[in-house]
């Protein structure tokens, strides 16, 4: 029997949301390949939590609870993953295309001389070979690719969804074997993002502001609405380049690619480069004073008018509807 | 110290992408090509380091078809020291195959730092930098938003999904550049004049067997047309109702 390895990412000692998606779809791919699913967790996690990945399809969970792996270091994490993949003779190594997955997957691919496809949004198994679908040219085109031989893939978060395939099933949890852990790179400083700030990459709802907001201070209006909806605040490049918002909040071709269930655009025109980052959203809402703004043609719902009049009313209406 | 910058030529961000009749290639006629925006940050950073005296020279290396020369010419206009064109007509979407070609070339070069973009906006792979590090056996730090060099050490600041990191690495190493690192400059008239007279050496290369094979390309499903709920604050109540009841997203 062959093996599929899923790499699970922790954030503040618990699983990131994308882990469940990765394990669940790892299982579906493994089934079609006749493989079993092993999940590797670099870092330490409560055993019971680890065992629960069985519900999502894990056949075995390997925990690499080692002090040196507490803070992310690409070389050390890579060594652990490569070591485990070798031991299992893994046919597929699967990541979520988060910051960490995007940083690690190519290293593992090169170290093991495998074949890689990043940020996939679809897959199928055909005669023992994996075929994947992934956006190219900033989502203007979807490419279907055939991967020959052993491969590494990363799944675009929030596309596939997670389900409990084996309700109630616990997976056996073991210690991962550790290779020598060495890196020339040292982490001098790490400051965790404030616990209350939701990243656009993780949010189910995003409220994005553009040039129409006119100042950094005016983003407080978006923050207020976002807090009510447990949403993250995003920004267009125009807002970021005006220094109203940090670069990490930029959505688009040169920012983050997001696929939330609701994406609200306030005072943003919907440029082609912005569209590249958010066109995968399930529902798009635009608030713009210009009825001819490109986003009005493409959003699912829009309200035409001055955002400074509309936003306070929208916020009040949502508060009322809680 | 010498800096090598890896550059890819890509379609302009505004370009309309038309799939060819073979379903695999993109129709290039009439299309505008640019330096990959993230590689512009890499070039700018290299120029800054040379201005600061930490780097003595900058070599730009690009692999791609004949048209790639235009992007290399643009980099010479910015006054990098030399440009090298690795010529292949293959449309290579296999990141590891690209990294192997670059590694083969760069390993015999004299370099202290390799600067790259975090991602090429055409394939969107985000692979080649970390792969090249692996193949050359040197550290690779990705997504830099600040790079400070002191002696044979480099300090890099970057944003991860969970916070801000400051990393330190010995040279030589690879750093991939993220937006926010710097503001790329425009070429000067002097640079443009100088670039006209410079040679761009070409070298034919062959890509190894690629493990990634493109089967077909399609356009994403068009979103069904928008609906204007109304104008001004009066439309808000209906918007909220629709989001709750029809779209069921709040
Ligand atoms: C290489 C490259 C990469 C790029 N990458 C990105 C990227 O990743 N992300 C990105 O976002 N952009 C990117 N851009 C920039 C992009 O081309 C646009 O310039 C940018 O998205 C515009 O931002 P905006 O919509 O906020 O501003 P604008 O296009 O100026 O739109 C502002 C909108 O606000 C509306 N408005 C103004 N006042 C009000 C009001 N009081 N009430 C209601 N509506 C109002 C206006 O009608 C207008 O539609 C990139 C560009 C290039 C060349
Ligand atoms: N054909 C190429 N020639 C030179 N550099 C490249 C090439 N392809 C990718 N790169 C470099 O690798 C980075 C990441 O590309 P990618 O992994 O394709 O997203 C780019 O920003 C370039 O710096």
Image (cartoon, rainbow, N blue to C red):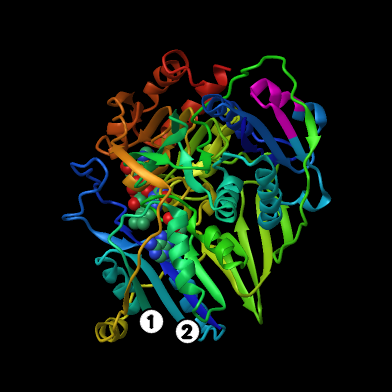
**Would residue A267 be seen by someone viewing this image from the given angle?**
no
Residue at position x 36%, y 77% from top? B83
Question: First in sequence: mark 2 or mark 1?
Answer: 2
Tag 2–tag 1 contact (CB < 8 Å): yes
**Would residue A216 be seen by someone viewing this image from the given angle?**
yes
Give the labeled residue for mark 1: B82
Q: Quadrant of the C terminus of chain A?
A: top right
Tag 1, which chain?
Answer: B
- Give neighbour class at mark 1: few <14, some 14-19, many 20+ (Cα, 10 Å): many
User: As rendered, which of A103 and A223 lies closer to the eye?
Assistant: A103
Q: Position of residue B35 (x, y in %)?
A: 34, 64
Height in image: B236 above or below B14? above
Q: Is residue A53 magenta?
A: yes
Residue at position x 52%, y 41% from top? A153
Q: Position of residue B111 (x, y in %)?
A: 53, 79
At numbered mark 1, what does the secondary structure look like: helix, strand or loop? strand
Give the labeled residue for mark 2: B57
Q: In the drawing, does residue B171 fall left or right of residue A272?
A: right
User: As rendered, which of A43 and B237 lies closer to the eye?
Assistant: A43
Q: Quadrant of the N terminus of chain A?
A: top right
Q: CA distance from mark 2 to mark 1?
A: 8 Å
User: As rendered, which of B226 and B35 lies closer to the eye?
Assistant: B35
- The magenta span reads A51-61
The single residue placed furthest to the front in the displayed view is: A1
Q: Position of residue B116 (x, y in %)?
A: 48, 65
């Amino acid at each position: 029997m062959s093996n599929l390895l899923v790499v699970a990412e922790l954030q503040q000692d618990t699983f990131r949301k994308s882990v469940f998606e990765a394990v669940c779809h790892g299982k579906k791919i493994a089934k079609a390949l006749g493989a079993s699913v092993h999940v590797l967790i670099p870092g330490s996690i409560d055993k019971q939590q680890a065992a629960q990945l069985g519900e999502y399809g894990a056949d075995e969970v390997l925990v690499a609870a080692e002090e040196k792996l507490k803070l992310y270091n690409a070389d050390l994490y890579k060594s652990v993953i490569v070591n485990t993949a070798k031991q299992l003779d893994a046919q597929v190594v699967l990541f979520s295309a988060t910051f960490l997955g995007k940083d690690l997957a190519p290293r593992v691919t090169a170290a093991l001389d495998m074949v890689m496809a990043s940020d996939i949004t679809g897959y199928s198994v055909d005669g023992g070979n994996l075929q994947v679908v992934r956006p190219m040219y900033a989502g203007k085109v979807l490419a279907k690719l055939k991967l020959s031989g052993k491969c590494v893939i990363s799944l675009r978060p929030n596309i596939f969804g997670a389900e409990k395939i084996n309700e109630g099933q616990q997976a056996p949890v073991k210690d991962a074997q550790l290779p020598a852990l060495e890196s020339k790179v040292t982490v001098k400083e790490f400051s965790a993002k404030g616990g209350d700030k939701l990243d656009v990459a993780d949010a189910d709802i995003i409220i994005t502001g553009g040039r129409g907001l006119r100042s950094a201070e005016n983003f407080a209006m978006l923050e207020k609405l976002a807090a009510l909806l447990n949403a993250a605040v995003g920004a267009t490049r125009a807002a970021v380049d005006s220094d109203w918002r940090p670069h990490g909040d930029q959505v688009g071709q040169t920012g983050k690619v997001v696929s939330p269930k609701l994406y609200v655009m306030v005072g943003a025109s919907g440029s082609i480069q912005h569209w590249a980052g958010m066109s995968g959203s399930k529902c798009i809402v635009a608030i713009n004073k210009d009825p001819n703004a490109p986003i009005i043609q493409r959003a699912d719902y829009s309200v035409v008018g001055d955002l400074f009049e509309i936003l306070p009313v929208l916020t009040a209406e949502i508060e009322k509807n809680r | 110290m010498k800096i090598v910058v890896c550059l890819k030529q890509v379609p302009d961000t505004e370009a309309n992408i038309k799939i060819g009749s073979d379903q695999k290639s993109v129709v290039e006629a009439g299309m505008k090509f640019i330096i990959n925006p993230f590689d512009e940050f890499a070039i700018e950073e290299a120029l800054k380091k040379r201005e600061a005296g930490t780097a003595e020279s900058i070599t730009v290396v690009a692999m791609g078809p004949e048209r790639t020369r235009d992007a290399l010419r643009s980099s010479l206009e910015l006054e990098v020291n030399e440009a090298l064109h690795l010529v292949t007509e293959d449309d290579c979407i296999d990141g590891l195959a690209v990294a192997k070609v670059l590694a083969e070339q760069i390993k015999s070069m004299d370099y202290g730092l390799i600067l790259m973009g975090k991602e090429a906006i055409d394939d969107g792979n985000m692979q080649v930098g970390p792969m090249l590090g692996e193949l050359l056996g040197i550290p690779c730090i990705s997504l830099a938003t600040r790079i400070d060099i002191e002696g044979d050490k480099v300090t890099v600041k970057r944003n991860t999904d969970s916070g801000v990191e400051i990393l330190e690495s010995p040279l030589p190493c690879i750093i991939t550049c993220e937006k926010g690192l710097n503001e790329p400059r425009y070429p000067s008239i002097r640079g443009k004049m100088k670039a006209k007279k410079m040679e761009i050496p070409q070298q034919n290369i062959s890509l190894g067997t690629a493990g990634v094979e493109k089967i077909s390309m399609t356009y994403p499903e068009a979103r069904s047309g928008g609906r204007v709920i109304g104008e001004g604050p009066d439309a808000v109540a209906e918007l909220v109702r629709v989001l709750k009841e029809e779209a069921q997203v709040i």
